[in-house]
Amino acid sequence: MQRDDEAARERSLKRAVLAGDEDAWRELYERAYNRTRAYIVWRCAGRTDWTDDVLQETWMIAVRRIRKFDPDVGSFVDWLRGIAANVLRNRIRGTNGQVTGTGSRLEPADDRRPEQPLEQRERAAAIAQALATLPPHYEDVLRAKYVDRRSVIEIAAAGGQSAKAVESLLGRARDAFRKSYARTTGESHEPS
């Protein structure tokens, strides 16, 4: 579907949601859920204990702020991803950068046992923290490449840039990620 067609459909769905149409809300949800969850999994570096909390909070905010969604500015999925990024950034800031250990706002709120070994959870926390420090355009290009699995040519076409410009941006984004990760852990890591 072309972006103009998608924007028109999302405008129509937003109007219906605001008029109380539950089916319209369900359609928005179903169209966006998997891609939003994939983004959150990536931003949480696979930490399932964080992913569920961030995903739930993202949808709760979206329900409260649906009036602010503007399909002419961007897609519903992109709007949700922006909310999710802010939720995660706020949680990391709320821990003063301490994203591991007990008592962190990012730890599970209930008695669930994390599915990953401690070392893996700590690495995931450091990756999430490093991603949260990146400028939005770096995060966007890394997300397009590693979450959306788009080729450099596809990213370039979508952004009206040359493939060479996107390759350069990817290189700078990877470098910024490596530096941020190294500051957090003292080691380097490529985004996965």
Image: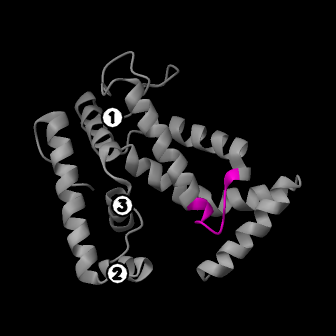
Q: Is residue 96 magenta?
A: no
User: Which of these two is toward me, 183 or 34?
Assistant: 183
As drawn, the label of residue 46 is none
Q: Is residue 71 magenta?
A: yes
Q: Secondary structure at mark 1?
A: loop
Real-space Cα separation, disc 1 to disc 3, in angstroms: 30 Å
- Residue visible at 33% across and 52% down? 135
According to the picture, the residue beneath numbered tag 3 turns out to be 137
User: Which of these two is toward me, 60 or 33?
Assistant: 60
Mark with earlier residue (1, 2): 1
As drawn, the label of residue 161 is 2
Mark with earlier residue (1, 3): 1
Q: Residues within 10 Å of mark 2 (few under 14, many from 20)?
A: few
Answer whether residue 114 is visible to the viewer in this image.
Answer: no
Real-space Cα separation, disc 1 to disc 2, in angstroms: 40 Å
Q: Position of residue 76 (x, y in %)?
A: 62, 61
Give the vertical position of 11 relative to 83 (above or below): below
